Structures are given as structure tokens and as C-alpha cells.
Amino acid sequence: MFVRDLALTDYRSWDTVHLELRPEPTILVGRNGFGKTNLLESLFYVATLRSHRVSSDAPLVRTGAAAARIRTTVENDGRELTVELTIREKGANKATLNTAPVRRTRDVLGVLRTVLFAPEDLALVRGEPGERRRFVDEITVQLRPIAAAARTDYERVLRQRSALLKTAGSAMRRSSAEADSVMSTLDVWDEQLAQFGAEVTADRLAVVRALNPLVEQAYASIAPHSRRAGIAYRSAAGPELDEIAGGAETVADIREILGDRLREVRSREIDRGVCLIGPHRDDLYLHLGEEPAKGFASHGESWSMALALRLACVEILRADGVEPVIMLDDVFAELDVARREKLAEFTADAEQLLITAAVGADIPQVLSGRRISVGVVEDDAGRRSAIIGDERASEEAG
């Protein structure tokens, strides 16, 4: 699989840009703040319908514009598919596939599969649980695009149930009739939360169990003298759920556990006005030996674990029959020489490799390829990001 071309309009710092790409290493070089990462982010958005840097879509729209547009053509085994996404600052996004409108933007999931390595990956080890939930959800929807539907449904029900919980306590104190109404409505939301939460959790559990041996292998290769690495799922519903294998056949079992736990904590949820049980409260447990990586891993071990997580994603996508596009966003500047070489070794045989760097010398020689210079030019509207040099274009012109 590879991206044949990418065109952006009003996307972050880019008013317009068009890149033609090939199945080879392509290195985007330019100072920080010139828009290199935005190019990779746009492709990651096509693959996951999420940015790896922000939690909402509004920052993706260039200042002063009403919407951003991403158009990319992906080739896989000789078949070409063109996706166009319109990302609105306000309102619903839209998508087309081969110029035909799709009913839901998530219908384009699966056209592009990619793994992105970025400096933000250190937060997978040292950051909050939300970073790790985002990680497992992103790889899950690439493996099973239909999983995005359950996640969307779960988030909708969670918002509605959370809104009810915020007002439930005061409503129940006003009258018995209002108390009965609140409890009846909560019963309905609990049933839906347990169902959609079970679907989300089952998908996550299956992916985490598949990733675990791959993470162990990747980490051992990167840090052969360190402790054994691994990952496991940790549910807010308790260890009983963590032991379930995951997958569609376990949804009913997970639903029952979530339903029981929701009933057990209902009074506490009403008192606090928040939803305490569900996949929105779950976490991934990353460990080195018998200790959690968070708080115990050194800086080097943390980076090795972060790299192992991403390399495991590459392998799980390959095992699913698709060679993903690999993107390395300014990550070599963050690594020591040994880890740079190991990452280069793992990614050198990718069908398509897209790399950004502030300094070209940071890129190991084994990954040499086409180089594109990204900069900022002045125009009547002010500064804007622009492609200011392309070694291939220069060679072909000569």
C-alpha cells in the first residue's frame, strides 16, 4: 500500500499544497513550524479520522477558513481509491470515495492504513490513560473499521448519560416522582452503555492480546539487555473483565459484567455526577518485568517501549495482509544513536516511508531517498507554508 498523491486546502498552515508520492522513502526537511508535520497528520487523519495531536477537528482548519480539505489517492495491489474529506470548523464533516459521497465519514476507514511515529509517543508511556486509550482505538479501527461505529455510539450514550447524572441528585431530592423518572431513565441508558461499552471493550481486548507478544519481541530487539516488556488491559469494571479474551464472541459476557458494575456504583455516580464505569475509564498497563513502565522506566526505556508499541502496530497490520504506510515525524532527533539505527533497520523495507526532519543529517544513511524542502514564503496574504525544493524535480529537470 502507498499514497500516490496528497492535496490539502486550508489545512492548518497550508492554504494549498499538492504532493505526488511513490513507494519509496520520502524525506520532508524544514525548520520546525513550517508545516511538515501537518502533511503527515493529514494522512493519519484519513486512516483514523483523528489527529494524533489534538482531540477536536477545529484546529485542523486554517485560520480564517470555514473548512479544510484533504484529498489523497491510495494504491493497494494495483487498485486505486481516492478519498476526499471536508473538515468543518463547525458542523458535520463530509467525505467522498472516488468522487461519490458516502453516507458517513467513517465509511472511508480502511482505505489507508498507516503507523505514525512521533515525539508525542513518549506520552503513551508517561502520559495519562487517555493517551493509551487513543492508541488502542486508533489501531483497532484500522484493523476493524466497523469498530468505529460502536465507539461513536458509545460516546453518544456516554454524553447523554453523563448529562443526566449531573442533574440526577438534585432532581431526586425534589420529589419521589422525579426520582422515579431519573432511575427509569438511567435504566435505559445503562442498558445501552453496557451494550456499546461491551462492543468497544471486546475490540480493544482482542487487539491488546494480539499486540502483547509483538510488543515483547520488538522491545527485546530494541533493548536486548533490559527487562521483559508487555502490555495488558485494565478495566474500570475490575479484573474479572481483564481476563476475558475479547472479540465478538465475548460481547455478551462483557455486557453482563458492565451492567452489574453499573448497578453497583449507581449511587456513587449520582452523588458525584459522573460516569465511573466504562471503556472511557479504562487503561493499558505497560510493564517492564514486574514494574509498571510509568513511573519506573528510565528515559531510554520509555522511548524503547514507545517504539515497541508502534513497531508492534506495523507487524499486526502486516499480519492482517496489508503493508502499512510508515510515517516518522521528527522522531530521529529524539533518539540516541542505537535507537535511531534500530528504528531505521525496522522501517527500511517499508513499501512507503514518509519522514520529517528539521535537520537532514538526523536521518540514518540507510533511509536516504527523495528529499523535499518545506519552508515559508511571503505573499500578499502574509506568510504561508510552501514546498521550496524537491531533489527529484531538480534531477528530472536536469
Image: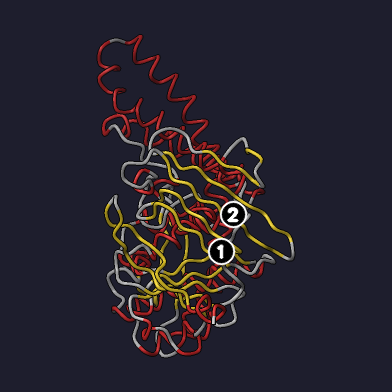
Dot 2, crowdedness within 10 Å: few (<14), some or many (≥20)?
A: many
Residue linked to disc 1: 209
Residue at left 39%, top 34%? Answer: 90
Q: Position of residue 265 (x, y in %)?
A: 37, 36
Q: Position of residue 49 (x, y in %)?
A: 50, 49
Give the color scheme: rainbow, by chain, secondary structure or one colour.
secondary structure
Kindly check if marks 1 and 2 are in contact, taking CB atoms under 8 A apart as contact: yes
Q: Quadrant of the C terminus?
A: bottom right
Which quarter of the picture shows residue 58? Answer: top left
Q: Residue furthest right?
A: 78
Instruction: Judge whether residue 331 can be spotted in this image.
Output: yes
Residue at left 37%, top 75%? Answer: 357
In terms of sequence position, does the residue under pointer 1 or pointer 2 come before the other? 1
Name the residue nearer the viewer: 89 or 167.
89
Q: Quadrant of the N terminus?
A: bottom right
| Above or below, comparing residue 393 to residue 41 in the picture | below
Residue linked to disc 2: 246
Which quarter of the picture shows residue 103? Answer: top right
Name the residue nearer the viewer: 40 or 4.
4
Name the residue nearer the viewer: 213 or 346.
346
Residue at left 57%, top 52%? Answer: 203
- The label number, if any, that marks residue 170 in the structure image: none
Q: Amino acid at mark 1?
A: Arg
| Above or below, comparing residue 229 to residue 3 in the picture | below
Q: Amino acid at mark 2?
A: Gly
Q: Please, what secondary structure does the residue beneath circle 1 have?
A: helix
Q: Position of residue 34 (x, y in %)?
A: 32, 64
In 3D space, how far apart are the residues under numbered discs 1 and 2 (Cα atoms)?
8 Å
| Above or below, comparing residue 256 to residue 347 in the picture | above
